[in-house]
Amino acid sequence: MRKEDARRREEAKKKAEVLVEALPWIHKMSGKTMVVKYGGAAMEDQSLCRSVLTDIELLKLMGVRVVLVHGGGKAINALLSKLELPVRFEKGLRVTDAATMEAVAEVLIGKVNQELVWLLNEYGANAVGISGADGKTLKCHQVDPVLGHVGEVSEVNTALIESVLEDGYIPVIASVGCGPDGLYNINADIAASKIAQALGAYTLAYLTDVDGLYGEMGNEESLISSLSRTECHLILESGELTTGMIPKITSIAEALDAGVHDVRIMNGTFPHALLLEQFTDAGIGTIFSQDLVMG
């Protein structure tokens, strides 16, 4: 046998092994709901964006009910800089005055949401773009007057999301909610968690710019591969989290408390991170899961 033929057979064998490894995961996830929070650098790079959206299309073809929730922090910052408006954060949340809220809505609803919908449709995975204000999907109230138009989700109306899913489309949701006095900016991590809880999702996945949760900041060798719900709460109570991680880990704890089976943090800049984390034994990020019940 020629070396080239042997190489091709070996490559084919490895691909077959990957498919066999994925079978139990596909069987488990088929028919279940998965909420994916998408943001960070993976949204800025065209090739990475293509990788993420291809993963979402494949998940849909496997029978997974995928809901995509997105932010757009870098694009918002770019517009604010162009408008010469300040970029300020308090406790990991964007300070959002009236002018900033206009910019947030313009970027998230008018630009990022429509671009993601267009790309998904181009790849063959029919998608429908909505914001949390559509159909009163994300009702909210003001978190703190100091933060301005930053909303805390008080109710998730799943009717529109379920209707889109039942019609065979992927809902693409911009993290903007509606309050009694107008639109509100909602942290995308929190929005994704609230939506996952309301839908009774099996999995909530966060695509971020880091590999997962580290035991020691700056030490890549301290990546934590898995944590239980109890351990997640202990980390929150420890006071050791960085400001930017507090909303994310809080939203993860709330999702687990509400019955979401597992929550995953993974690096969206790693090609096909969603598929590798969801359908391989090794995984590539940090998984938070329900406490084991000892029999």
Image: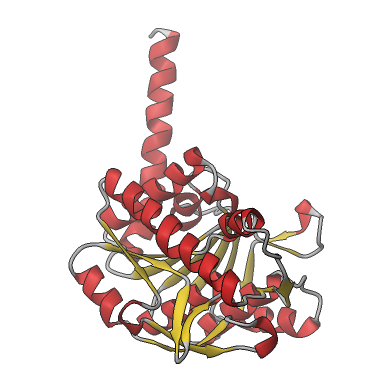
Q: Considering depth in this image, is 280 or 208 the residue closer to the camera?
A: 208
Q: Is residue 168 above or below residue 280?
A: below
Q: Is residue 30 above or below residue 75?
A: below
Name the residue furthest left: 167
Tell me if I can see residue 191 in this picture: yes
Q: Please tell me which residue is depicted at 81% across the width and 61% down the height of the picture.
A: 217
Expressed as whole percent of the image width and height from the top left, the position of residue 73 reads 59, 61
Expressed as whole percent of the image width and height from the top left, the position of residue 268 reads 55, 51
Q: Please tell me which residue is depicted at 67% across the width and 75% down the height of the picture.
A: 95
Q: Which quarter of the figure has residue 162?
A: bottom left
Q: Is residue 128 left or right of residue 291?
A: left
Q: Considering depth in this image, is 246 or 7 the residue closer to the camera?
A: 246
Q: Is residue 171 above or below residue 199?
A: above
Q: Is residue 161 left or right of residue 48?
A: left
Expressed as whole percent of the image width and height from the top left, the position of residue 90 reads 73, 77
Q: Please tell me which residue is depicted at 65% across the width and 60% down the height of the picture.
A: 212
Q: Which quarter of the figure has residue 243?
A: bottom right
Q: Considering depth in this image, is 80 or 23 the residue closer to the camera?
A: 80
Q: Is residue 95 left or right of residue 47?
A: right
Q: Which quarter of the figure has residue 30?
A: bottom left
Expressed as whole percent of the image width and height from the top left, the position of residue 96 reads 62, 75
